[in-house]
Image (cartoon, coloured by chain):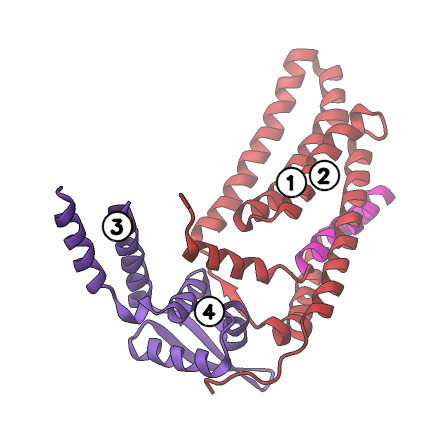
Chain colours: A purple, B red
């Protein structure tokens, strides 16, 4: 494939990236949640290193996109918010991962 | 960097954080230590060892809820059918191997000598290898060196105790379980204390409420 054509494909793939996933903080959240059935807010806070407000804001965006499910439960009368990756969220993350791998391969 | 995957790395680090508290080491070490001591005392006591996991599971859960979750948060790893099938497969293969080797020893050395050597040398080594599967799997999945070391200790203990004539047969199994279990327990306690010192209880951080 000619070099220009390869770069045009890279550019097209880049512009087609899912921006909800592409943001580094949200990507970190999704990457952590990927390995778990569910996790609470504190766990994500510790693992991502984000501030509470930042984490909360990104979680809201991910919930709006349907990538993360937020549910609340009580353990010994103490409320706990549990977060889990939804199937669309898992698919979006995998699609993003594949796209980035293709882009990096094409740029080499 | 070839083969470097930041997404997998983030997932792995999060999983490693779940075992940073040393509770699994304490439970495994405590279980084997008590089992080893009961086994040394004689068969009626050894039967009690089978009941130990029933008591340790609630204790581990209590420790997690009381000390760990308030510090680093709560997360559960998804356990697929594959892991249950893997455990069942491993147990079946192990039992088959254990019985199969008994016939092998008998066939090669004759019934009396074969049985004696199988019990004195092979069974302790087999036990060491069998117990090592768990720590090795944890070490491999979480890329944690300390679990490889625990696995190596079990494997080597089972092989070396009879060869060095320190103990053979059931005595070797008891001694190995007690020694390696004790070491694992103390290491786990050290990790737990270090964990408590490192992480303070978080203030109510749940901003999504």
Q: Quadrant of residue B27?
A: bottom right
| Range covered by the magenta-colored residues | B23-48
Left or right, residue B85 beside residue A7 = right
Residue marked by disc 3: A102
**Are the residues under marks 3 and 4 on the same chain?**
yes
A24 or A33: which is nearer to us? A24
Circle 1 residue: B132
Q: Chain of mark 2?
A: B
Question: From what the image shows, is residue A81 above or below residue B102?
Answer: below
Please give the name of the residue rendered at 31% of the width and 56% of the height, measured from the top-left corner: A97
The chain letter under disc 4 is A
Q: State the residue position of label 2.
A: B153
Measure the alpha-carbon separation of dots 4 and 1: 29 Å
Between the C-alphas of marks 1 and 3, the distance is 40 Å
Outermost front residue: A4
**Left or right relative to A8: residue B106:** right
**Does the stretch in magenta take in A77?**
no
User: Which callout, 1 or 2, points to the residue nearer the camera?
Assistant: 2
Above/below status of B165 relative to A71: above
| Callout 2: SS | helix
């Amino acid at each position: 494939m000619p070099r220009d054509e390869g770069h045009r494909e890279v550019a097209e793939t880049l512009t087609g990236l899912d921006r909800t996933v592409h943001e580094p903080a949200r990507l970190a959240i999704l990457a952590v949640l990927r390995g778990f059935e569910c996790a609470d807010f504190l766990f994500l806070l510790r693992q991502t290193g984000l501030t509470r407000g930042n984490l909360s804001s990104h979680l809201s965006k991910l919930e709006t996109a349907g990538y993360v499910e937020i549910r609340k439960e009580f353990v010994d009368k103490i409320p706990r918010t549990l977060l889990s990756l939804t199937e669309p969220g898992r698919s979006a993350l995998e699609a993003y991962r594949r796209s980035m791998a293709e882009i990096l391969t094409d740029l080499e | 960097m070839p083969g470097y995957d930041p997404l997998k790395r983030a997932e792995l680090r999060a999983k490693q954080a779940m075992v940073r508290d040393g509770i699994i080491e304490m439970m495994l070490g405590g279980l084997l230590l008590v089992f080893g001591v009961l086994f040394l005392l004689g068969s009626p006591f050894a039967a009690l060892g089978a009941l130990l996991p029933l008591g340790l599971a609630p204790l581990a859960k209590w420790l997690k809820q009381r000390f760990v979750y308030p510090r680093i948060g709560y997360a559960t790893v998804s356990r697929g059918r594959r892991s249950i099938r893997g455990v069942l497969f491993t147990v079946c293969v192990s039992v088959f191997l254990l019985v199969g080797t008994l016939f092998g020893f008998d066939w090669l050395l004759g019934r009396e000598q074969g049985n004696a050597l199988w019990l004195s040398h092979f069974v302790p080594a087999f036990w060491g290898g069998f117990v090592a599967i768990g720590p090795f799997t944890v070490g491999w999945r979480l890329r944690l060196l300390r679990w490889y070391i625990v696995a190596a200790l079990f494997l080597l203990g089972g092989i070396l105790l009879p060869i060095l004539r320190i103990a053979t047969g059931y005595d070797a199994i008891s001694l190995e379980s007690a020694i390696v279990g004790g070491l694992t327990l103390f290491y786990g306690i050290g990790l737990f204390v270090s964990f408590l010192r490192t992480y303070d209880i978080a203030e109510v951080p749940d901003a999504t409420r």
